[in-house]
């Protein structure tokens, strides 16, 4: 059995390596055919209209925030229980952040609190909201859209944890996380711990053609090039301040190859989550909120003995992780005025949460070992 066991990690198979090899032998090793195929297949996987691949998930957040027009003087609502990148992107644009606490049962932004916040604020206080499909549990985007519509908020869904995640909307229609049915745009990350990887990489999905065009332009320095410029073939115009956030062909080939296994791997994640659900049910811990369409990026348990359990599992070569330290605990955000005590539900969640190993190729013996060690730990209490 392979030790140590991380909480999440990539799986690179010979076919992935072959795809990268093939990409290396192409004439174009950036902005080539793997990029367009990866983007097209990603849209098909989620039932989105446009997918735009970028250098990483944070770049995806940054470009989306810019393309949505957030800027100085605007305020965007975030969740305190997320990776700092989903909040930092607002600050990159010059806009300010505000937070809505989580629902302690799910870890998702509490939509009742969002509603109350919007209703008790003057019209025009907020320009956007960034809901996170925390751990892979889909947030009801139709409800977010319903609540925010009259306040004209733009919605940027952080779906990093939930490619393949599904929820049923009020009309009874199955919706994929990040498909753009209700959010203006959604973003994904292809960091090695996520569902699929490109080493580093990210994706923006949307059903809005104009937004997609804007994001594509921002991805290449804000440069526009017409097909037949009258000035000559060399001619291009930089029309706005953009970035170089491209994904190269080696990365795109890896993503293209990995995406072919995404559905099968999601099924494996669910299967392993069910095994934990059953094997840990009688212990004095809280198990993750169950949902049919959960994408199980993380399997987050909650216990009052979190620190002790983390240390014990580490001593047994099981490397768990904590998702997340509330954003309002970060010194940078404290300098902006946020403080401990601002978001009691996210903070209580943080005190108890622990992400135990879950990934498609987690071995049966490895998972049995993790279960055995968690059970052994709780015998002491
Ligand atoms: C991973 C992650 C990001 C950032 O993605 P990078 O590719 O590492 O830049 C943003 N938000 C969430 C919720 C994430 O899990």
Image: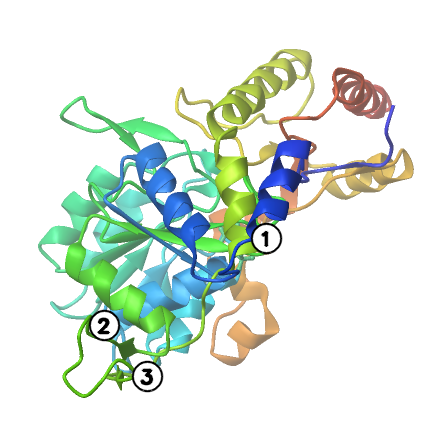
Q: Mark 3 points at which residue?
A: 241
- Place of residue 249 in the rendered image (x, y in percent of width and height, measured from the top left): 51, 55
Mark 2 against mark 1, which lies toward the viewer? 1
Image-quadrant location for residue 356: top right
Please identify the quadrant where the N terminus is shown.
top right
| In the foreground, 278 or 286 | 278
Q: How many labels does the image show?
A: 3
Mark 3 neighbour density, 10 Å: few (under 14) some (14–19) many (20 or more): few
Marks 1 and 3, how far apart in space?
A: 33 Å
On the image, the x and y values in percent for residue 218 come to: 32, 72
- Residue under the point 56% across and 50% down: 23
Q: Does the residue labelled 1 lie within 8 Å of ligand 1?
A: no
Front disc: 1 or 3 = 1
At horizontal 70% and vertical 38% (from top left) the residue drawn is: 7
As measured in the structure, the alpha-carbon distance from the residue carrying label 3 to the one carrying label 2 is 13 Å
Q: Mark 1 points at which residue?
A: 25
Mark with earlier residue (3, 2) = 2
Q: Which of marks 3 and 2 is in front?
A: 3
- Image position of 217 with respect to 361: above or below: below
Q: For numbered disc 3, what is the local secondary structure?
A: loop
Q: Is residue 13 visible?
A: no
The crowd level at tag 1 (other Cα within 10 Å; few <14, some 14-19, many 20+) is: few
State which tag comes first along the sequence, 1 or 3. Answer: 1
| Percent position of residue 36, x then y | 37, 50
């Amino acid at each position: 059995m392979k030790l140590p066991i991380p909480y999440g990690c990539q799986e690179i198979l010979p076919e992935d390596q072959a795809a990268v090899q093939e990409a290396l032998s192409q004439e174009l090793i950036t902005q080539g055919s793997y990029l367009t195929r990866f983007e097209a297949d990603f849209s098909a996987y989620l039932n989105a209209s446009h997918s735009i691949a970028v250098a990483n998930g944070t770049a995806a957040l940054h470009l989306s925030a810019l393309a949505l027009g957030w800027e100085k003087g605007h305020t965007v609502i975030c969740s305190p229980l997320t990776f700092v990148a989903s909040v930092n992107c607002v600050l990159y644009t010059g806009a300010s952040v505000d937070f809505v606490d989580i629902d302690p049962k799910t870890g998702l932004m509490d939509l009742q609190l969002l509603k109350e916040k919007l209703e008790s604020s003057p019209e025009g206080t907020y320009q956007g909201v960034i809901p996170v499909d925390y751990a892979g549990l889909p947030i009801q985007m139709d409800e977010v859209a319903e609540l925010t519509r009259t306040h004209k908020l733009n919605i940027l869904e952080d779906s990093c944890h939930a490619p393949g995640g599904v929820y049923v909307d009020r009309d009874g229609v199955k919706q994929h996380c990040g498909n753009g049915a209700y959010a203006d745009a959604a973003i994904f990350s292809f960091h090695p711990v996520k569902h699929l990887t490109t080493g580093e990489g990210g994706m923006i999905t949307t059903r809005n053609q104009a937004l997609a065009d804007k994001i594509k332009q921002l991805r290449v320095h804000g440069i526009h090039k017409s097909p037949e410029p009258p000035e000559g073939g060399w001619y291009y115009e930089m029309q706005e301040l953009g970035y170089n956030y491209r994904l190269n062909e080696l990365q795109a080939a890896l993503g293209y190859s990995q995406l072919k296994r995404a559905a099968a791997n999601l099924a494996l994640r669910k299967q392993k989550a069910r095994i934990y659900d059953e094997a840990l049910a009688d212990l004095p811990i809280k198990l993750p909120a169950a949902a049919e369409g959960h994408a199980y990026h993380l399997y987050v348990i909650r216990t009052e003995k979190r620190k002790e359990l983390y240390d014990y599992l580490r001593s047994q070569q099981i490397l768990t992780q904590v998702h997340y330290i509330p954003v309002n605990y970060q010194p940078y955000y404290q300098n902006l005025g946020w403080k401990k005590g601002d978001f009691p539900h996210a903070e209580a969640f943080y005190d108890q949460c622990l992400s135990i190993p879950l990934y498609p190729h987690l071995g049966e013996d490895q998972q049995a070992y993790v279960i055995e060690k968690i059970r052994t730990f709780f015998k002491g209490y």
